[in-house]
């Protein structure tokens, strides 16, 4: 059951809209849809709540409820959704949710709607944050397995002196016009049972077109994050973006607003959704073609030159080609082994151009600053610490990865030294894990240099991938791909007990010596043999004599 109890309905100071609301200019286009039994159950509870409010006589007009935006769009597309936004005409979302809390505790309501303890969750209020273009205050309740947001219908009024809108009660049409896209501006009227279209949403659904309800420049400058949201919807739904909107998405005024007005956290959330989606390549392609890269991938806390992104497409197109041509033992199959790894792979691909920017200058004894590829992730899109550690490791280890790959391709004498490769893989994996993705990062950075026409050391795509496949096949052949999980024959305690000395600086290099020996002797199972080897190299390892 809801944990918060309702106050008297008339006690809420913002329950009624102010006078002077604009009325709807024209009837909306409508169609019908069929609800599932569970959706019908939710609808009946909400309509029953609205009826109770009407009967109280507290409001000047009947309560009209509408399911809005994404749920309606997905319903028309046959996509199941458990997130439902409920727009209310005559009261705030919080006041309506509190009324639900009240009646759901009544025995009559519980019996009528078959409510069980797990059917109704707690009420959560999400405050508005206009400074970060979070203009809507919403109240969320878990009902019958759905996450239901409640908010009043709104209209936005912007002034020349403020980037933040004045939020007022509005009509359904005004609420529809302030949304990011016409396909997200559809309503399902719970009172009539019809889908209502106050813009061109139904027609655009048929055309598979992403279009803004108002003039694109107004839509995007009001909330620049809508630029990224439209890209996400276009790639997720495989719709096209209206050419008129695309032109404005590249406008310098919109890019400046996106860079300065929107919090980096919100930008990061949109990018994560895109790169975890089914079409990450198309998302990055939109960002490239529309000139959005430098507004997204930047560190706003630093003044830095922008990287050359003219060859960036080679990186994300290469990754997409590897994904599409995945077969057992192929490059993608070996290097990308989970959904999480796939997301990390696309994130690394998105910042590949920053690799050539290197690292900020460093002087003094303090810890050196992270490379630009890391700071762009950390500050530009608020990547997680784990993601940033992976970016730093990928940047720092790329030279060694390339050196070993070159040795394999040139059939150098040392390529069968298992300890050389095994210990390198363990080093790559020590801090950030995901050594495979570090190898993939090196591949993608090299792709930007070697696959571009006119590059210093050009190669064909087939030959380029053949070389990397040869490298990975060699790691399989010498059996080092699982090097990070190699179990030690001898631990630290065994060592200092066997050697008769206390732990000291000698420990780490000696433990590494032991692991390297294990890679050279994969069949060894007797720790005493390894300990004797350590004793024989006591001086070289800096191990003191027995105490």
Image (tube, rainbow, N blue to C red):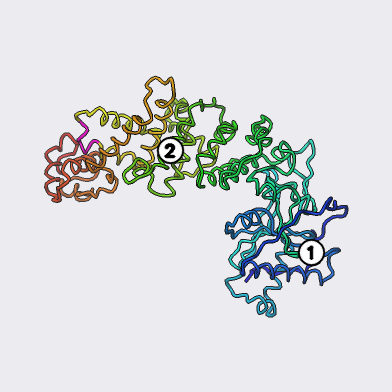
| Residue to which mark 1 is pinned | 63
Of callouts 1 and 2, the N-terminal one = 1
- Label 2: element kind: helix
Judging depth in this view, the residue of 317 and 268 nearest the camera is 317
Instruction: Report the span colored magenta.
Output: 414-420
Q: Is residue 138 left or right of residue 51?
A: left
Q: Where residue 396 sits in the image (x, y, percent)?
A: 38, 33
Task: Tell me the quadrant of the picture where the N terminus can be found.
Answer: bottom right
Give the camera-side residue of 534 and 253. 253
Q: Which residue is mark 2?
A: 319
Q: How far apart in space, not on screen, are marks 1 and 2 (Cα)?
A: 52 Å
Q: Is residue 502 magenta?
A: no
Residue 433 visible in the picture: no
Determine crowd level at label 1: few under 14, some 14-19, many 20+ residues with C-alpha closer than 10 A: some
Residue at 64% across / 59% down in the picture?
84
Residue at x-position 70% and y-position 64%: 97
SS at mark 1 in the image = loop
Question: Residue 392, position in %: x, y?
Answer: 42, 36
């Amino acid at each position: 059951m809801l944990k918060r109890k309702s106050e008297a309905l008339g006690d809420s100071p913002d329950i009624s809209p102010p006078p002077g609301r604009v009325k709807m200019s024209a009837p909306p286009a409508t169609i019908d849809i069929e609800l599932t039994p569970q959706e019908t159950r939710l609808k009946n509870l909400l309509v029953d709540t609205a009826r109770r409010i009407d009967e109280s006589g507290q409001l000047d007009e009947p309560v009209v409820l509408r399911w809005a935006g994404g749920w309606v769009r997905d319903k028309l597309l046959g996509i199941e959704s458990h997130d439902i936004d409920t727009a209310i005409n005559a009261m705030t979302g919080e006041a309506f949710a509190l009324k639900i809390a009240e009646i759901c505790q009544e025995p009559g309501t519980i019996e009528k709607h078959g409510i069980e303890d797990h059917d109704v969750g707690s009420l959560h209020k999400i405050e508005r944050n206009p400074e970060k273009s979070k203009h809507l205050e919403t109240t969320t309740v878990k009902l019958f397995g759905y996450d239901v947001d409640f908010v009043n219908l709104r209209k936005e009024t912007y002034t020349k002196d403020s980037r933040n809108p004045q939020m007022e009660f509005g009509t359904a049409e005004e609420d529809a016009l302030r949304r990011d896209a016409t396909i997200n501006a559809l309503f399902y009227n719970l009172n009539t049972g019809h889908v209502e279209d106050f813009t061109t949403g139904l027609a655009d659904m048929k055309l598979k077109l992403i279009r803004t309800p108002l003039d694109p420049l107004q839509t995007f400058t009001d909330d620049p994050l809508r630029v990224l949201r439209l890209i996400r919807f276009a790639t997720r739904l495989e719709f096209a973006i209206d050419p008129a909107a695309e032109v404005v998405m590249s406008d310098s005024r919109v890019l400046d607003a996106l860079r300065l007005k929107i919090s980096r956290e919100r930008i990061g959330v949109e990018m994560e959704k895109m790169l975890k989606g089914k079409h990450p390549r198309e998302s990055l392609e939109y960002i490239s073609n529309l000139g959005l890269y430098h507004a997204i991938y930047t560190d706003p806390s630093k003044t830095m030159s922008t990287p050359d992104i003219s060859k960036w497409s080679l990186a994300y197109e290469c990754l997409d080609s590897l994904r599409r041509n995945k077969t057992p033992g192929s490059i993608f199959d070996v290097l990308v082994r989970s959904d999480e790894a796939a997301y990390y792979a696309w994130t690394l691909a998105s910042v590949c151009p920053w690799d050539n920017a290197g690292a900020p200058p460093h002087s003094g004894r303090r810890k050196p600053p992270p490379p630009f590829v890391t700071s762009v992730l950390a500050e530009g899109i608020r990547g997680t610490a784990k993601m940033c550690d992976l970016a730093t490791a990928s940047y720092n280890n790329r030279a060694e990865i390339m050196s070993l790959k070159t040795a394999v391709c040139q059939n150098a004498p040392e390529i069968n030294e298992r300890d050389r490769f095994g210990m390198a893989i363990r080093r790559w994996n020590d801090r950030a894990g995901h050594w495979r993705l570090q190898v993939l990062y090196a591949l993608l950075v090299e792709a930007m240099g070697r696959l571009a026409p006119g590059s210093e050391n050009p190669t064909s795509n087939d030959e380029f991938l053949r070389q990397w496949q040869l490298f990975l096949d060699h790691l399989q052949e010498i059996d080092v791909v699982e090097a990070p999980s190699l179990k030690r024959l001898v631990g630290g305690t065994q060592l200092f007990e066997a050697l008769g000395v206390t732990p000291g600086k000698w420990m780490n290099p000696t433990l590494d010596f032991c692991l390297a020996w294990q890679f050279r002797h994969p069949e060894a199972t007797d720790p005493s043999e390894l300990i004797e080897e350590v004793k024989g190299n006591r001086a070289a390892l800096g191990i003191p004599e027995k105490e």
